[in-house]
Image (cartoon, grey):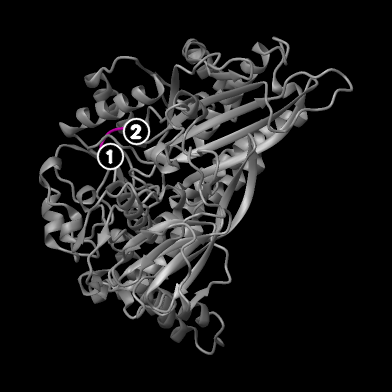
Amino acid sequence: MKALHQRLHLYTDAEDTYIFTPIDGVHAQSLTIDRHSGDITLNRPNTPLPKHARRSPKTVYGILGLLSLSLTEYIIIITGRELRGRIMGHEVYRAVDFDILPLNPNVSVSNPPHPVEGHFLALARSHLYGGNFLFSYEWDLTRRLQAQYKNRDGDVNKAFWEAADDRFFWNRFLQSKLIETATLNPKQDLGAYILPIVYGTFDIRPAFLHGRHMQLCLISRRSRHRAGTRYFRRGIDSQGHVANFNETEQLVLIEGQSTPGAQRPSDDTYASKLSFVQIRGSIPVFWSEINTLRYKPDLQIMYSHETTQAMRAHLQEQRSLYGDQTLVNLVNQKGYEQPVKEAYEKYLSAVDPPGVRYEYFDFHNECKKMRWDRISLLVDKTKDDLDGYGYFHANDLQSEPVRLQQGTVRTNCMDNLDRTNVVQAFLAKWNLNKQLQELGILPHDAGIDNYEAFSKDFREMWADHADAIAKAYGGSGALKSDFTRTNKRTRKGVLEDGYKSVMRYLKNNYFDGARQDAFDLMTGNWVPRKNPSSALFLVTDPRPLITRSMPVIASFSLFMICAGLTLPRTSDYSLFYFFMLWFSLLSLSMVFIIAHGIDYVSWPRLVPPTDSIYYSGPGYRSGHHGMGFKAGAGILGGLSAKLVDQATKPMGHRVPIEEVEMGVKKRVD
């Protein structure tokens, strides 16, 4: 593929242009972005800089893209990076610092002229600094090794962005203007400036086993489609995209055998390259969970004729990309999760897709009392599929791969986090043992657990990977990660899981609304109009005064009760009425807050899930908690009456929420 510029100088020509010049490359072409028109121009080689251009002291490590907000467009650049590792001779970096450059000279990023613009910029910063963004200038992080091999001849003359996997090209929307310019004008070959970013994880470690040097690598790639947070992105959309879709690739890079005393080959030379891919994603039906301040949200499943079409589209896409599928479902068969399991099985039976096999495993029931070794029962059930799918294997003696992976296991639980992490790590270990045995590195009766140093690296990689995916979606590290990290379930791990569960509850109820807004803004799911006044609902509180005042009353009542405990007891009679007054106010305010719990949840405001909250069509609802005495009267109802009305319409005939919200929905696919 064509090379990417690795380091750039940034020049500002008064208030007219931004100019990016490559530091490496004698005859490289500089890039100019006009601050007034927004035009992007690739200059001829050796074009001189304007006389009064000022150079930024910061080195630019890549252009993330352009973001259009309500007052102007902004260029987002990477100004800090850290090396995460080196794979097959190519460095992989994590973006750690960013700058946001306004095109309009009259707009200040540090002191925006309008509160709405300031709110948008705060969302952008929180997304940039809260995510795990990875990139490489020479190796395509967006595609698994097998896909790179299959397309290597056709990719020779392509730019990185042209070859990248669209699902995992996280900044595809931000790069849309550069891509459009390059597409409409072939002479403007901007490929060297369009840097694809992956939201995911990357870990690579050296290993040594039975005289063979190797590297063990684990990569996860998060899909930009239906991206978001735990309770605000569930299920499937009409295009077949599911929430929290992640592709996980385990790579083993093995050096050739060398004779004793011979010089060790280069670290980047490998006799065998092996890859094993698994995927995860939300249960592919229309469903959601409605936060009400209770620990268990209300479960909502929407029965719709669109479900079969959406599920069919999703499974057809997975088959076209990965081959045959084994769908492993880990949700509980009783209690709260049972309706989701039944809906999944109902629609899967209706779709009846070829090349797809369903496997149910009641994780919590099978592994109760810390019997985590019983996951082997699931491996026994899927062993024939795993043997048939195999893994990707290429070596340095053949131009064509030795074998291809013919299918994948798609695993899900409710969140696709904790149970899914444990099962995927177990399947990955089973496959790694098989790979090393078939290459003759391990005896057929041995596994990596027999080699503590190797096993420890494997467990730590998968535990770190699980924590990163869980933090991105759920807000805390993964539960049950003590088993992944130590190969056993411990009481300390159970206590840590309790703490993580509390953190998830707090973040999911009180902080994830803004985080979801940031996802929607940065991935192009909602685009603001060029009028900040049309988005004032973002910086105002539409709830009634009584709703807003209840937390204040509860807090003040609690303060007065605590203060009363320190008062001198001159009269028990007067203290009785004092405490009765404040306990009454505290109780009444808490009852009100619990009864109207939905109004106290931090909801997304750009694309609010009103169609799920107030859904009244066919389906299942576990309860209608936290809705007070009049549904739609609070923060969500205050946005627009149309939002509630549309929830009663068929899913395919609703007014787009974004139009009601004075924005424009846009997706660049």
Q: Residues within 10 Å of mark 2 (few under 14, many from 20)?
A: many
Give coordinates of residue 150: x percent, y percent: 46, 23
Position of 651 compared to 425: left or right? Answer: left
Q: Say what amino acid the circle numbered 2 marks.
A: Ile
Q: Quadrant of residue 100?
A: bottom left
The residue sitting at 20% across, 70% down in the picture is 534
Q: Secondary structure at mark 2?
A: loop
Residue 371 in view in this figure:
no
Front residue of 481 and 99: 99
**Residue 162 inside the magenta-drawn segment:** no
The residue sitting at 72% across, 16% down in the picture is 441
Position of 225 compared to 449: left or right? Answer: left
Count of numbered labels shown in the rendering: 2
Q: Secondary structure at mark 1?
A: strand
Q: Say what amino acid the circle numbered 1 marks.
A: Trp
Q: Quadrant of residue 411?
A: top left
Give coordinates of residue 580: x percent, y percent: 40, 77
Q: Quadrant of the C terminus?
A: top left
Q: Quadrant of residue 321?
A: top left
Give coordinates of residue 103: x percent, y percent: 36, 71
Separation of disc 1 and disc 2 at Cα?
A: 8 Å
The residue sitting at 53% across, 18% down in the picture is 391
Give yes or no for contact between labels 1 and 2 (Cβ–Cβ under 8 Å): yes
**Residue 285 inside the magenta-drawn segment:** yes
Q: Is residue 41 above or below residue 410?
A: below
Residue 83 in view in this figure:
yes
Q: Is residue 289 above or below residue 374?
A: below
Residue highlighted by disc 1: 287
Residue highlighted by disc 2: 283
Position of 221 compared to 39: left or right? Answer: right
Magenta-colored span: 283-287
The residue sitting at 73% across, 20% down in the picture is 256
